Amino acid sequence: MRQLLERIAEAVQKRIAELPTGFDGSEQVSVGASGSPTSRIDKLAEDVVIDFVRTSELDMNILSEEAGMQDIGSERTLVVDPVDGTANFHSEIPFYAVSLALGSSRLGDVTHGLVRNLVSGETYYAEKGKGAWLDDVSISTREFEPGSSLFLAYVGNRTDASTWKVAEKVRRIRSLGCASLEMCHIGRGMADGFYFNCLDLKKRMRIVDIAASALVLREAGGELFNMDGKVLDMAFSLDDRSNFLALGDPGAKEMIL
């Protein structure tokens, strides 16, 4: 399964690398299944994934940010975010990724996940019960130390005020604009947590945003919680949206929430 997901990610990366200089990926070309605007770059990358799966006659449904659920009656569903960090792409910030996860119906039953940085090619992969890797190197989270802690967070015009309270509890806080890669950075021990708390329901995280990176983080030793402190689970549906806290060291939950 790893090789298959890597081939899909490579196809997306290759297509984006072939784009001509001056390509305007920000143009809105449609409205996605979730009701959000679909930009040219999102549609282009998504088409690559769907064409690969269907041309290869793979036995899997597809749930993607733009196309929604394509149900062929399979027991497995490929959960896709073709370009996570679209705003970074538009601003030429080299921090965006393709996210691919395989499961049946919920976040908790995802069995395989892959996140590839579409600029550097760094690839995070996880298999349920077997671990997580950056390329071919096993990764793990780090112990939470408040005095040297680094947190990542959603920061925007709809940020919940509780975010600033979290910032007061840790040493440093950053906002990088690509949730899947930010969670993978926690998984490899580069950061301690990711706090996402948005006032706008329509801008909260969906399963396509975090399905793969959640498995990477969990297999590396971390965990995700909702704002009530319960382990996060989400349905394979674009209608299911949530705020959450991701931690490399789950024991830090009581201090942060």
Image: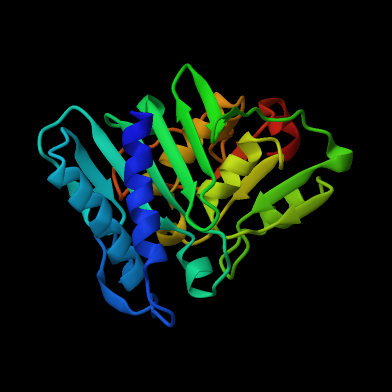
The quadrant in which residue 36 appears is: bottom left
Q: Is 164 positioned to the left or the right of 74 in the image?
A: right
Give the quadrant of residue 218. top right
Q: Which residue is pictured at 69% across the width and 29% down the height?
A: 249
Q: Is residue 106 visible?
A: no
- Pick the residue in front: 246 or 201: 246
182 displayed left or right of 40? right
Q: Is residue 41 above or below residue 220?
A: below
Residue sitting at x 63%, y 43%:
185
Res 21 seen here: yes
Of the pair 243 and 132, the residue shown nearer to us: 132
Q: In the displayed structure, would residue 123 be above or below residue 38? A: above
- Which residue is located at x 81 percent, y 46 percent? 170
Q: Position of residue 197 (x, y in %)?
A: 57, 52
Closest to the observer, 107 or 115: 115
Give residue 184's position: percent from left, percent from top: 57, 41
Colouring method of the image: rainbow
